[in-house]
Structures are given as structure tokens and as C-alpha cells.
Image (cartoon, rainbow, N blue to C red):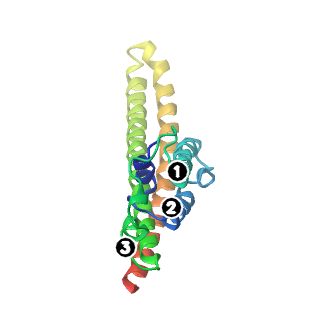
Amino acid sequence: MTRDEALRILGLKEGATEADIKLAYKEMAQILHPDKFADNKKLQDRATEQFKQVNQAREVLASGKSSRGEARARSSSSRPASAAAGYSGGSDTAAGLRARLAGIAAVRVQLVAQLDAELDSRKVGFYLVGGGILATLLGRLIKPLLALGPTAIVWGAVQVVRAQASIGAINKHLEDMEQQRKAIEKKLEKL
């Protein structure tokens, strides 16, 4: 993983400080930790993979090198620390809040993609149920379809229920993130 990839995963920009990296990591960990998806194995597996990337991104940024051992493409040693961070002054509160907002935005994109996949999965489940009902009705005329109909109905129903549970969990996480985003924006307005 390169430094640019690590910054993108954590929702940060070049020049992020160590405090920005820690804050963005903490935010991502709160949102993506696999334990939050314990009720859904598929989402938990996805969260585990994404959480591994978040951990790897933090390690790359903390070490200042890519995970392949390559030197950083840009060295911040040639610029003053305040210029590298993109601001001057001792307070990084606003920068930290912006980093958290960027992290929330990055996670939101991933969750929306997962939500789209689950909505598609639910749609396929409905098609299976409808096809199973049709196959059962046609089974009176074509005997092999009689065996396929109930199987498709059950399989489709299971897929719909599983997808609906995932959709509910994702929507809850999206709502939580929206509340966090609003709270952070209010804090930024006060600064």
C-alpha cells in the first residue's frame, strides 16, 4: 500500500499530522469495527477486510513508508511542518474535525456501495420467490418444474430476509454517521 492509498483510505490529505491520522483511524475503527456487525456474517466479513485496510493504512502513515518498504514519494522534511500540514498555528482542532469529516465521508461511500449490493440481493430474492411461484403453478403442466418451484420460493425468501437484515444494519450505521457528521459540523461552526 502506498502513502497516497493510505491517506485515501483514512480520508486524509497530504500533510496530515500524526494527530489527524490517529483521529481518523479512531473514527474509522468506531464505524467499521467487525464486532458492530456480529449479527450479519457477510457484513462482518466485509468489515473485517476493510478494517484490515484501515489498520494497514495507519501503519503505513505511522511509519512514513509504503507497506512494500518503498520510500515516501514526497518527503515532508523539505518543507516546514506547518506548511506540510496545510495550516499554521498550534491548534489542530479544526484540522482534526475536518479529518473526522473526511473519514466519515469515506466510510459512507463504502456503506452506500454495500447498501446498493444488498438492495440488489433483495431484488434477486423477490425474483426467485416470484419465479418459484410461477414454476409451482406451471408444475401442474410440466412435472419437473413442480420440484423447482418450492425450492426457489424458500431460497428467495431466505435471501430477502438476509438482505433486509443487512439493509437495516447498514441504514442504522448511516444514520449514526449522519448524526456524527452534523455534530462535527456544529463544532466546526463554533470555531
Closer to viewer: mark 1 or mark 3: 3
> In the current view of this chain or complex, which residue is farthest to the top?
143
- What residue is pinned by disc 3? 87
**Residue type indicated by callout 2:** Ile
Q: Going by the image, does 165 lie left or right of 113?
A: right
Q: Position of residue 78 (x, y in %)?
A: 39, 59
The answer to which of marks 2 and 3 sits earlier in the sequence is: 2
Q: Label 1 neighbourhood size at 10 Å, few (<14), some (14-19), many (20+)?
A: many
Closer to viewer: mark 2 or mark 3: 3
Residue nearer the viewer, 162 or 79: 79
Residue nearer the viewer, 77 or 124: 77
Q: Residue at x 46, y 79 (%)?
A: 91
CA distance for labels 1 and 3: 25 Å
Closer to viewer: mark 2 or mark 1: 2
Image height of 180 relative to 148, above or below: below
> In the current view of this chain or complex, which residue is farthest to the bottom?
190
Q: Position of residue 45 (x, y in %)?
A: 57, 41
Image height of 126 relative to 24, above or below: above
Q: Label 3 neighbourhood size at 10 Å, few (<14), some (14-19), many (20+)?
A: few
- What residue is pinned by disc 1? 54
| SS state under label 3 | loop
- What residue is pinned by disc 2? 21
